[in-house]
Image: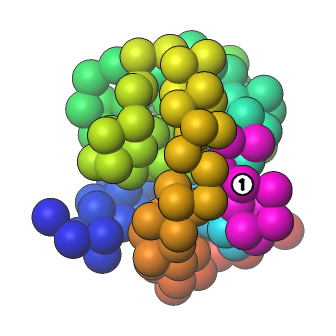
């Protein structure tokens, strides 16, 4: 599966299962996180996503579709938390594709830190596709 196909799947699930607030929050993250990855690296950017949502949400388990459905179905979670968690879940899928351990946050961060800029370069196409697709599909936050 290409990075475009992976990004299309992620955006399709967000579109199918999330309300307008969560979609626009995801769009905001899709516009912000590529710069964070470029300037501070994927490990730190992913830590931000986990900190502003929760490790539990990003590592909910199951398929990406099941994770998106669970995040968007959580009525106790605010729009921003959902946006961070959704983007984190989509990144987790990319990490899995790159052979990064995705069992827990500490293991993932350690592996990302060890691989450094190499992972950042490998993710560039995927996060750019996520950004373009989210901008095309979802309304900006108001």
The answer to whether one can see residue 28 in this image is no
- Residue 44 figure quarter: top right
Which secondary structure is most common in the magenta stretch?
A: helix
The answer to whether one can see residue 52 in this image is yes
Q: Is residue 29 a member of the stretch shown in magenta?
A: no
Residue 11 placed where, x, y %? 40, 62
Magenta residues span 35-44
Say above or below: 100 vs 104: below
Assign the C terminus to one quadrant of the image. bottom right
Q: Which residue is mark 1?
A: 41
Left or right? Give the position of 1 relative to 54.
left
Q: How many marks?
A: 1
Left or right? Give the position of 31 relative to 12.
right
- Residue 115 figure quarter: top right
Residue 119 placed where, x, y %? 51, 56
Foreground residue among 60 and 104: 104
Packing grade of label 1 (10 A; few <14, some 14-19, many >=20) is many
- Residue 35 figure quarter: bottom right
Assign the N terminus to one quadrant of the image. bottom left
The residue tagged with tag 1: helix, strand or loop? loop
Left or right? Give the position of 7 relative to 137.
left
Q: Residue at 27% of width from left, 23% of height from top?
A: 62
Q: Is residue 36 a member of the stretch shown in magenta?
A: yes
Residue 46 placed where, x, y %? 66, 41
Residue located farthest toward the front when viewing the structure as drawn? 114
Residue 8 placed where, x, y %? 31, 69
Q: Residue at 36% of width from left, 66% of height from top?
A: 7
Foreground residue among 23 and 47: 47
Foreground residue among 63 and 24: 63
Say above or below: 126 vs 92: below
Color scheme of the displayed model: rainbow
């Amino acid at each position: 599966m290409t990075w475009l196909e992976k990004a299309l799947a992620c955006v399709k699930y967000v579109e199918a299962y999330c309300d307008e607030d969560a979609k626009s929050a995801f769009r905001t993250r899709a516009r912000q996180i590529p710069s964070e990855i470029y300037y501070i690296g994927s490990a730190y950017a992913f830590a931000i996503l986990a900190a502003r949502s929760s490790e539990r949400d990003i590592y909910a388990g199951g398929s990406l579709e099941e994770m998106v459905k669970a995040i968007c179905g959580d009525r106790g979670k605010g729009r921003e938390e959902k946006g961070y968690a959704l983007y984190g879940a989509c990144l987790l899928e990319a990490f899995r594709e790159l052979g990064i351990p995705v069992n827990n946050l500490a293991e993932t961060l350690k592996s990302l830190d060890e691989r450094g800029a190499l992972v950042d370069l490998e993710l560039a196409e995927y996060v750019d596709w996520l950004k373009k697709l989210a901008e095309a599909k979802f309304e900006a936050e108001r």
